[in-house]
Image: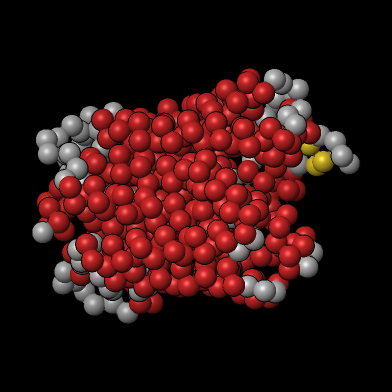
Amino acid sequence: MTSPKSTGAAKTLGTAFSSYQKFVVAVLAFLQFTIVLDFMLPSPLGALVIPALKITPAQFGWVVSAYAFSAGMSGLLTAGFADRFDRKKLLLFFYRGFLAGTLLCGVATSYYWLLFARMVTGVFAGVVGSISFSIVSDLFALEMRGRVMGLIQTAFSVSSVLGIPLALALSTRWGWNTPFFMIVGVGAVFGVLIQIYLRPVDGHLQPHPERSPLDHLLQTVSNRFYLQAFATTGLLTLGGFMLMPFVSVFMVHNVGIPIEELPVVYMITGAFSIVAGPLIGRAADAVGKLEVFAFGCAVTIVMVLIYTHLHSSPLWAFIVVSVLLQIGIFSRIISSSALMSAVPKPADRGSFMSISSSLQQMSGGLAAVIAGLIVVQVPDGPLLHFDTLGYVLACSTLACLALMYLIDRKISSARPSTAPEVAAAMK
């Protein structure tokens, strides 16, 4: 079947969320919030952690990197097993491991203890996200996934606007480890809710050819269509993460924004993202996921070229540019997440999502390395060649749009509907 519009553009009846689906979205969004908050915590807490544990900045850098590296590796190691269990049981297992790792962070009293704790946390956290997105694909029709992804991805913004300021306030008053205890306490409550109210998610366990975990992994990574999707995901992440490591330095030294006003920039852009996320998700379902992705690419290219060429600018002007750039980036992330969820077959979703999550982690690290080779900072001065990162991001965005177009065409022709599959999963 071919469709005149991109995947997800069809307006079908019965696409309102049921009360159970609303519960699933709320739980998964909160889990994503705790994962993102835990991932982001070490950076702002660095000024407190370094003197408290008597470690060097280089050692603290390893503490931050250990999480991402462990998360990336765990996605690959668990990919072969990801479709062999009820996703509810798998989610609970890895979320409990994540909370245990976070608790270890809270009670850490030395550099090596904290380093080990971040590695443990990353191992489990790196899989929670992929399981969550697999559950979304199992329980929601493709025509609804834009809205779901919009709500879940908003967790990133909520963690910036609410989570980080609250964590900093708690750590300033009661110590750097307090936010980790907060995550464990609140996360445990939601873990109990999942245990009690989330139904088994095992529709993907219907009889299919028995494969060993290794065979399952090899079959996933050898599927040509999956490889195309992985390449698109990697390229999308690679371009998107190039600016992130140097944004604060660029704002202070190139744009001339006082360091005391940086929280204002993050809070305002984050607040706009909280509002924009669900709206973008709705647009992806109503208009089409490829169309929203193309819109996001166009906005991203224009705004990133403006952003990376900014010099001394008033705060309000920089915030306007940042908000528009954030809208472009969110449009790409939400629509691509929803569209990519239609790529794997139900029996391969867990493996596909695990590999995709791992690839995102590793691509983000590679992006930081490449960006570090391009930009140069004058001692106590501005960044040089930051505009080059803008050109690289613009080119990678165009390449992603071409790849996403091909993926959308194949999905539209191969998969007329996911509604029967979702109806079976909801029974």
Residue at position x 23%, y 66% in the image: 196
Q: Quarter holding the N terminus?
A: top left
Q: Is residue 220 above or below residue 316?
A: below
Residue at position x 66%, y 65% in the image: 63
Q: Position of residue 402 (x, y in %)?
A: 44, 37
Front position in the image: 378 or 197: 197
Front position in the image: 319 or 416: 319
Residue at position x 63%, y 54% in the image: 173
Q: Is residue 250 left or right of residue 105?
A: right
User: Quadrant of the rendered structure where residue 307 is?
Assistant: top right
Residue at position x 67%, y 46% in the image: 245
The count of marks equals 0
Colouring rule applied to residues: secondary structure
Q: Is residue 310 above or below residue 192?
A: above
Q: Position of residue 126 (x, y in %)?
A: 47, 63
Q: Is residue 229 left or right of residue 40?
A: left
Q: Which residue sits furthest right? A: 379
User: Quadrant of the rendered structure where residue 362 is?
Assistant: bottom right
Q: Which residue sits furthest front? A: 173
